[in-house]
Image: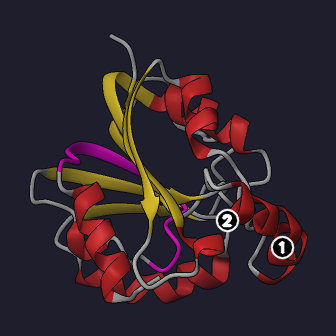
């Protein structure tokens, strides 16, 4: 996920993030160098303590204030209407109760706040879909719960009425792994 191709996608997603930010699925902190200066503070959540340990060097090197927490995105302890922006990069595929996590994202966003995301998931090509459905049980075991066959557009639209979205295949990535959903969902005022 740290290749030049994925770095480019991260930069695109983070370009318009602002204010107080919540990042779901922080992992090892690969997004940190690409946050714009207008970000005031980032609260990060990720349930993986091992990834958190690896993220510490990036956290120390950041000029942005960071509140780093080891917890999952399905039950956030933050108050309603807390964040200006929420970010998720290649995370929704592996959250066990993704619908609940999206409800939490919506809940903690301020009215008018935006959810910035890039995720991989279910292709629009039936041939690729068949392989995604076949490989998902194995992928879940070897890739920390990752589902290749989640329809991210459908999941996000269940929580947000206003969604701008682009779908495409990632460069230099097998189609079964690289069908991407990149978008911004806005919470109603």
Mark 1 or mark 2, which has the lower sequence index? 2
- The part of the image, by quadrant, that contains residue 29 is bottom left
Q: Position of residue 25 (x, y in %)?
A: 55, 62
Q: Position of residue 90 (x, y in %)?
A: 53, 64
Viewer-side residue, 161 vs 38: 161
Dot 2 lies on which element?
Answer: loop
Provide residue 170's location: percent of width, then percent of height: 43, 71
Q: Is label 1 in a helix, a strand or a loop?
A: helix
In the figure, 34 relative to 40: above or below?
below
Q: Nearer the viewer, residue 33 or 183?
A: 183
Q: Residue at x 88, y 68 (%)?
A: 134
Residue 178 lies in the magenta stretch: no
Specify whether residue 79 is in view: no
- Residue under pointer 2: 47
Range covered by the magenta-colored residues: 16-28
Label 2, residues with CA under 10 Å away: few <14, some 14-19, many ≥20 = some
Q: Which dot, 1 or 2, sits closer to the camera?
A: 1
- Left or right relative to 48: residue 31: left
Residue 135's label in the rendered image is 1
Q: Residue at x 63, y 49 (%)?
A: 73
Q: Are marks 1 and 2 in contact (CB under 8 Å)?
A: no
Q: Residue at x 40, y 78 (%)?
A: 171
């Amino acid at each position: 996920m740290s290749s030049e191709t994925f770095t480019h996608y991260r930069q695109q997603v983070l370009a318009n993030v602002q204010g107080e930010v919540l990042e779901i699925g922080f992992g090892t902190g690969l997004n940190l160098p690409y946050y714009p200066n207008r970000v005031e503070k980032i609260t990060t959540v990720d349930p993986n303590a091992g990834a958190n340990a690896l993220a510490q060097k990036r956290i120390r090197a950041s000029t942005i204030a960071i509140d780093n927490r080891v917890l999952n995105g399905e039950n956030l302890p933050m108050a309603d209407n807390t964040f200006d922006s929420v970010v998720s990069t290649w995370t929704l595929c592996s959250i066990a109760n993704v619908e609940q996590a999206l409800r939490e994202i919506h809940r903690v966003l301020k009215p008018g706040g935006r959810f910035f995301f890039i995720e991989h998931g279910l292709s629009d090509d039936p041939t690729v879909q068949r392989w995604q459905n076949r490989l998902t049980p194995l992928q879940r075991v070897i890739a920390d719960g990752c589902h290749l066959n989640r329809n991210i557009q459908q999941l996000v639209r269940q929580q947000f009425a206003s969604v701008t979205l682009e779908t495409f295949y990632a460069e230099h990535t097998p189609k079964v792994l690289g069908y991407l959903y990149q978008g911004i969902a806005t919470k109603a005022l």
